[in-house]
Image (tube, helix red, strand yellow):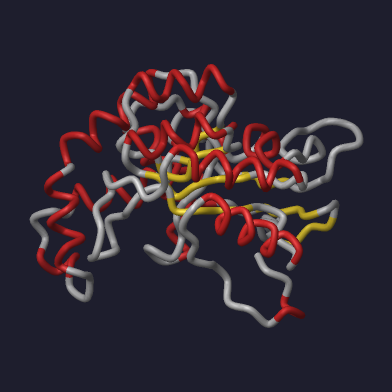
C-alpha cells in the first residue's frame, strides 16, 4: 500500500526496466512494504487474457531486484504458466493465483522456495456455474468466455497443485465475491485434492512464514495469541471452518460460545 500522506493512487503503469525500477523505488519511498505487479492478464478484465504475459524477463528481473535492494518482497498477479515461470525466475516471494501453472513450473516454485496463494474458490466456483446464466449477471461477458475456454486447464492445474509439494498459503481474492464467503477457500482446496491439514496450515504456519511472522500461526510460548476454535473437527469435515465460534486476538477474546445453562 502507498502511505496515505502521499495522497496518491495505489498502482502505477510502467514500461521498460528503467521506468519500472523508478516506479518500484517510488512506491517503496511512499511506504509500500510489498510490491505487487501484474505478470499476466486476468479473467475479470475484458481487454486481456490470463495467458498473456505482460512483462519481459528483463523487466521482471529489474522490478524484483529494485525491491530486493530495498528489502521489500514482491508478488505478482499471475495466471498463465509463462508469466508465473518468469516471475519465479526473477525471484518473487510468492505467486498470487497461478491457476494455469504447469507441473514443471510448480516444481520450479518448490525448488526456489516460492509460495503459492492459489485462490481456488474464485476459480472453481466460476467453473461450477458455467451453465448458470444468473451467476454471470452483472459480470463482463468476456469473463464467462475465458473461464469456459480454460476450464479443463484450470481443473488440471488445481490437481497439479494438490500433487505438488509447493508451499501453499491461504488467500481468497476477496472482492471477487462477498467477504463473508472467504471460508469457502478451504473446501475448494480440499475438493481439488489438497489434504485438510495442508489447507489449514496454509492459513496458519505457512501463511506466517510467507509474511515473515514466526510469532503467528503456531501454538507455542511467546507466540502472538491469535486463535480461533470450531464446534466440530475440520479434519473430518472441512466445512466446519464456517462455524467459528471462538476468536481470540492478541490474547483478548472477541467471540465466545454462549454458556450452556446448568441443568
Along the horizontal axis of the image, is 29 left or right of 140? right
Q: Nearer the viewer, residue 165 or 71?
A: 71
In the current view of this chain or complex, which residue is farthest to the right?
222
Q: Is residue 253 above or below residue 217?
A: below
Q: Nearer the viewer, residue 47 or 241?
A: 47
Q: Nearer the viewer, residue 15 or 263?
A: 15
Percent x, y of residue 179: 47, 64
Percent x, y of residue 249: 77, 55
The image quadrant that residue 218 belongs to is top right
The image quadrant that residue 194 belongs to is top left
Q: Is residue 15 above or below residue 137?
A: above
Q: Please tell me which residue is depicted at 29% across the width and 62% down the height of the picture.
A: 44
Percent x, y of residue 96: 47, 45
Percent x, y of residue 27: 67, 63
Q: Is residue 239 above or below residue 156?
A: below
Along the horizontal axis of the image, is 127 left or right of 245? left
Q: Please tell me which residue is depicted at 49% across the width and 45% down the height of the picture.
A: 59
Q: Please tell me which residue is depicted at 20% across the width and 69% down the height of the picture.
A: 140
Along the horizontal axis of the image, is 19 left or right of 213? left
Q: Please tell me which residue is depicted at 65% across the width and 37% down the height of the picture.
A: 210
Q: Quadrant of the N terminus?
A: bottom right
- Count how many numbered circles sit on residues in the image: 0
Amino acid at each position: 500500500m502507498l502511505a496515505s500522506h502521499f495522497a496518491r493512487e495505489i498502482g502505477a503503469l510502467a514500461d521498460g526496466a528503467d521506468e519500472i525500477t523508478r516506479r518500484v523505488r517510488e512506491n517503496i519511498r511512499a511506504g509500500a512494504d510489498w510490491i505487487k505487479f501484474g505478470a499476466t492478464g486476468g479473467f475479470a478484465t475484458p481487454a486481456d487474457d490470463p495467458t498473456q504475459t505482460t512483462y519481459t524477463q528483463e523487466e521482471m528481473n529489474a522490478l524484483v531486484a529494485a525491491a530486493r535492494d530495498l528489502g521489500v518482497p514482491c508478488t505478482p498477479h499471475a495466471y498463465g504458466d509463462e508469466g508465473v515461470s518468469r516471475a519465479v525466475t526473477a525471484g518473487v516471494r510468492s505467486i498470487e493465483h497461478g491457476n494455469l501453472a504447469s507441473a514443471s513450473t510448480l516444481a520450479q516454485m518448490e525448488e526456489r522456495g516460492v509460495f503459492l496463494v492459489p485462490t481456488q474458490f474464485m476459480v472453481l466456483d466460476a467453473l461450477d456455474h458455467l451453465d448458470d446464466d444468473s451467476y454471470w449477471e452483472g459480470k463482463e461477458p468476456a469473463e464467462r468466455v475465458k473461464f469456459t475456454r480454460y476450464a479443463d486447464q484450470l481443473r488440471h492445474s488445481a490437481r497439479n497443485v494438490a500433487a505438488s509439494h509447493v508451499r501453499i498459503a491461504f488467500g481468497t481474492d476477496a472482492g471477487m465475491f462477498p467477504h463473508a464467503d472467504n471460508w469457502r477457500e478451504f473446501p475448494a482446496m480440499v475438493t481439488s485434492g489438497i489434504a485438510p491439514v495442508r489447507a489449514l496450515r496454509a492459513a496458519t504456519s505457512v501463511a506466517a512464514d510467507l509474511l515473515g511472522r514466526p510469532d503467528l500461526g503456531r501454538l507455542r510460548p511467546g507466540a502472538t495469541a491469535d486463535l480461533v476454535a470450531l464446534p466440530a473437527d475440520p479434519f473430518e469435515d472441512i466445512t466446519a471452518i464456517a462455524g467459528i465460534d471462538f476468536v481470540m486476538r492478541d490474547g483478548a477474546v472477541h467471540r465466545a460460545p454462549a454458556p450452556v445453562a446448568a441443568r
